[in-house]
Image (cartoon, helix red, strand yellow):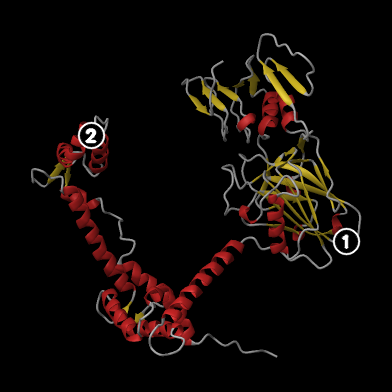
């Protein structure tokens, strides 16, 4: 049986757009007569051509007059410096008038032995105004001053108000009666006792309803892009998180200038359906294996959105292999779900709450580690190749002798030039994982790296002969290359671009780049050796 769909009553439609226009007028003590008197006056002001209706013609006419007013104001702002009255403004006139106007401030600063000088303020004004001298003859004419107003429109002008009315009404034309009817509908909605006057309680109730409506819209906007399929009644929901995976991917997401990690998720045998939510800070591709048929849904997210870092409103960079695309979901914003590296922790509790809101069920299992090699589900077991209890100490000595008294413990001593392969394994103990980009289900396109990221890219370029290394551990660019992605912080190095060698493509991050041909230093902090 089909049910008829009833369109909203006219008064309801009118109220919806009139609330956008006149809600500020519905105050305690207001009467319908007062409100409509104000509306008639406003309508007459908005009806620029006086034809009894608001339309695009009124927008255009108001805009024309507003542009003229903007030109007048621009001319007045510039020509006030025409000290000799010849119709032109010169740099000398600007300086003379400003020094005259700033004489009191200058006298006061001298009285208290202040270092204040008006010169900087005067120079700034001269630079701003003389930019209007289009023909560069050293004088600003009235015509040139008028042109400085090109494109300027008052943000709250009448043209903008007419556009607001037309947009709110959803019409090409609004007649006076439409205008009055909309205001009356809103008034009667607020005047709940129907006595023709807005009481203090009615005004308060209406104001509070607006606050609630605003809060509801904000909540709805915050949820947009954070929607996920609901977990089934039988599914076990798991939340895994960490700062980073321990291996590098040979496949990048979206950009050659993003460092993408990869880790493994092993699904243990069993019959219970699993709903996995995995969040990291770094962009990551997860390789899923084992009893993959158990996965009802896997959601992967990260805090990175591109080479520039993290945009809260942009799609996280994340991907999956080994799971059919119809069972993979991605969040549309990074601020839907954060990462955490310890559970329980404040971060894990907040993220668990977000998962409950998005999936309809609280996580049954929470597992987290700063650095992750393998997550196992549903046990929550984590494998890592890093020793997170003590960390490691690296002592880098370029030359001379080094004496260590007592046990070296877990210290690594590097003498002479840095060893790129050792550095790579220290930063990425999982090495570089080979992934077929065609198998990646991701939020953005997955493509092979031209040059592997970070220290892995340094190793790759050294092996190809595009880079060589000097005794100071600096990398000499011998041919056209691309900077490896992710050379930030401790990963940064020094590149020497030799004469006749094209400047590399990509982003050097925090690395120092010295160009032999010009002697210029670019990128990060360059230390002489």
Q: 501 or 55: nearer the eye?
A: 55
Which mark is drawn over residue 322? Answer: none
Please give the label number shown on residue 272.
1
The residue that appears at 38% across and 82% down in the rendered structure is 183
Quadrant (top left, top right, bottom left, bottom right) of the N terminus = bottom right
In the rendered structure, the answer to whether residue 322 lies left or right of residue 120 reads: right
Residue 204: name its quadrant.
bottom left
Where is residue 510, by image quadrant? top right
Q: Is residue 161 above or below residue 373?
A: below
Q: Which residue is found at the position 39% from the left and 78% from the top? A: 26
Residue that badge 2 annotates: 109
Q: CA distance from mark 1 to mark 2?
A: 80 Å
Judged by depth in the image, the label closer to the viewer, 1 or 2, is: 2
Q: Is residue 407 above or below residue 21?
A: above
Q: Nearer the viewer, residue 368 or 372?
A: 368
Q: Residues within 10 Å of mark 2 (few under 14, many from 20)?
A: few
Give residue 148's position: percent from left, percent from top. 25, 50
The residue located at (62%, 52%) in the rendering is 334
Q: Quadrant of residue 251?
A: top right
Q: Nearer the viewer, residue 486 or 353?
A: 353
Q: Earlier in the sequence, mark 1 or mark 2?
A: 2
Q: Specify whether residue 8 is in view.
A: yes
Q: Is residue 307 above or below residue 504?
A: below
> Is the C terminus in the top left, top right, bottom left or bottom right quadrant?
top right
* Above or below, comparing residue 56 to residue 304 in the picture: below
Left or right: residue 478 versus residue 275 is left
Categorize mark 1 by other alpha carbons within 10 Å: few (<14), some (14-19), many (20+).
few
């Amino acid at each position: 049986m089909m049910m008829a769909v009833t369109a909203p009553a006219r008064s309801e439609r009118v109220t919806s757009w009139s609330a956008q226009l006149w809600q500020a007028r519905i105050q305690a003590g207001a009467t319908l007569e007062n409100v409509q008197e104000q509306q008639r006056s406003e309508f007459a002001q908005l009806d620029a051509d006086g034809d009894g209706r608001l339309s695009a013609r009124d927008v255009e006419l108001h805009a024309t007059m507003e542009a003229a007013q903007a030109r007048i104001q621009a001319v007045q702002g510039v020509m006030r410096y025409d000290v000799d009255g010849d119709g032109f403004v010169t740099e000398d006139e600007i300086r003379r008038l400003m020094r005259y106007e700033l004489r009191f401030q200058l006298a006061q600063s001298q009285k208290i032995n202040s270092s204040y000088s008006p010169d900087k303020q005067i120079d700034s004004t001269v630079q701003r105004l003389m930019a209007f001298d289009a023909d560069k003859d050293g004088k600003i004419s009235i015509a040139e001053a008028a042109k400085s107003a090109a494109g300027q429109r008052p943000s709250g002008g009448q043209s903008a108000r007419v556009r607001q009315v037309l947009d709110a009404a959803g019409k090409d034309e609004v007649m006076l009666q439409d205008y009055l009817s909309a205001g009356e509908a809103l008034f009667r909605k607020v005047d709940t006792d129907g006595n023709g006057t807005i009481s203090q309680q009615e005004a308060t109730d209406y104001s509070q309803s607006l606050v609630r409506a605003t809060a509801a819209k904000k909540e709805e906007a915050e949820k947009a892009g954070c929607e996920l399929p609901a977990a089934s009644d039988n599914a076990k929901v798991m939340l895994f998180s960490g700062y980073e995976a321990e291996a590098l991917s040979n496949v990048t997401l979206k950009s050659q200038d993003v460092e993408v990690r990869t880790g493994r998720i092993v699904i243990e045998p069993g019959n219970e359906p699993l709903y996995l939510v995995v969040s990291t800070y770094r962009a990551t591709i997860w390789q899923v294996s084992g009893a993959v048929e158990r996965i009802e849904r896997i959601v992967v997210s990260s805090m990175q959105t591109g080479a520039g870092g993290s945009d809260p409103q942009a799609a996280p960079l994340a991907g999956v292999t080994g799971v059919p695309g119809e069972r993979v979901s991605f969040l549309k914003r990074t601020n839907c779900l954060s990462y955490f590296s310890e559970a329980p922790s404040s971060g894990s509790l907040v993220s668990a709450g977000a998962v409950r809101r998005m999936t309809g069920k609280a996580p049954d299992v929470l597992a987290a580690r700063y650095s992750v090699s393998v997550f196992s589900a549903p046990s929550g077991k984590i494998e890592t190749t890093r020793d997170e209890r003590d960390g490691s100490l690296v002592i880098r000595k370029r030359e001379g002798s080094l004496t260590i008294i007592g046990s070296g413990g877990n210290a690594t001593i590097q003498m002479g030039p840095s060893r790129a392969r050792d550095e790579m394994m220290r930063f990425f103990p999982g090495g570089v994982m080979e992934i077929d980009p065609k198998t990646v289900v991701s939020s953005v396109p997955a493509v092979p790296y031209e040059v592997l990221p970070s220290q892995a890219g340094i190793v790759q370029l050294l092996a190809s002969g595009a880079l060589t290394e000097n005794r100071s551990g600096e990398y000499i660019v011998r041919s056209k290359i691309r900077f490896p992605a992710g050379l930030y912080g401790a990963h940064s190095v020094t590149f020497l671009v030799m004469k006749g060698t094209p400047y590399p493509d990509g982003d050097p991050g925090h690395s120092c780049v010295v160009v032999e041909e010009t002697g210029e230093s670019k990128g990060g902090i360059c230390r002489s050796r």
